[in-house]
Amino acid sequence: MRFSQKDIRRAGLLGLAAIMAMFAPAALQAQDLGTAVVPTAIIYPGEEVTAGRVQEVEVTNPNLAGDYARTAKEVVGLISRSTLLPGRTIPISSLREPFAMTRGSTVRLTFSIGNMTISAAGSPLVDAAVGDVIRARNLDSGVIVSGTVMSDGTIHVVAK
């Protein structure tokens, strides 16, 4: 029986595919999928994520997808928005920055226009992180104003 070049080429490709299939599991194991951060104990909403409550583990599931934390440095010091279970990856979206100011505390309200700056004592009406736009009560006049929480602990009031 005589084989054509096309038949020989097809047999070679099938043989190559069979060899690749035999070594595919080993190739997947050798592939570095990186690390993920998982809690070592339950972390409830509102609790701070500390270094002692999380650990970095190697990812073994090639189908793992999403916005999960890959290093402990990404999550330590943040606050949980939802319950984080031991051994489960930590979605970045389930964490938030700690509050810069709390409801009812006394803060400084500032308003600037040109070279003029007005400052007054105020009280935030909600807990807020840096960059949040919140409402606060001017303690001198009782007027409620809106402003942005600044990193120095003040609220920069916006003009109406």
Image (cartoon, grey):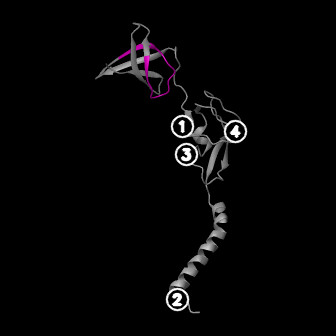
Position above or below: 41 against 129: below
| Residue 87 image-quadrant placement | top right
Q: Label 4 sits on what residue type?
A: Pro
Mark 1 in CB contact with mark 3 (< 8 angstroms) = no
Res. 15 image quadrant: bottom right
SS for tag 1?
A: helix
Residue 10 is situated, as x and y percent measured from the top left of the image, at: 54, 80
Tag 1: amino acid:
Ser
SS at mark 3 in the image: loop
How packed mark 3 is, by other alpha carbons closer than 10 Å (few <14, some 14-19, many 20 or more), is: few
Q: Earlier in the sequence, mark 3 or mark 2?
A: 2
Q: Nearer the viewer, residue 136 or 13?
A: 13
Tell me where the magenta segment starts and ends, as one range.
118-135
Q: Which mark is residue 50?
A: none
- In three-dimensional space, the C-alpha distance between marks 1 and 3, rounded to whole angstroms, equals 10 Å
Q: Nearer the viewer, residue 79 or 93?
A: 93
SS label for mark 2: loop
Q: Earlier in the sequence, mark 4 or mark 1?
A: 4
User: Which residue does the numbered mark 3 point to in the structure image?
Assistant: 66
Locate residue 48, reporting x and y percent: 62, 30
Q: Is residue 133 left or right of residue 12?
A: left
Q: Amino acid at mark 3?
A: Gly
Please tell me whether residue 32 is drawn above or below residue 45 in the rendered image: below
Residues at discs 4 and 2 in contact (Cβ within 8 Å): no
Mark 2 residue crowding within 10 angstroms, few (<14) / some (14–19) / many (20+): few
Pointer 4 residue:
86
Residue 99, percent from left and from top: 53, 25
Residue placed farthest to the front in the image? 1
Q: Secondary structure at mark 4?
A: loop
On residue 4, which mark appears? 2
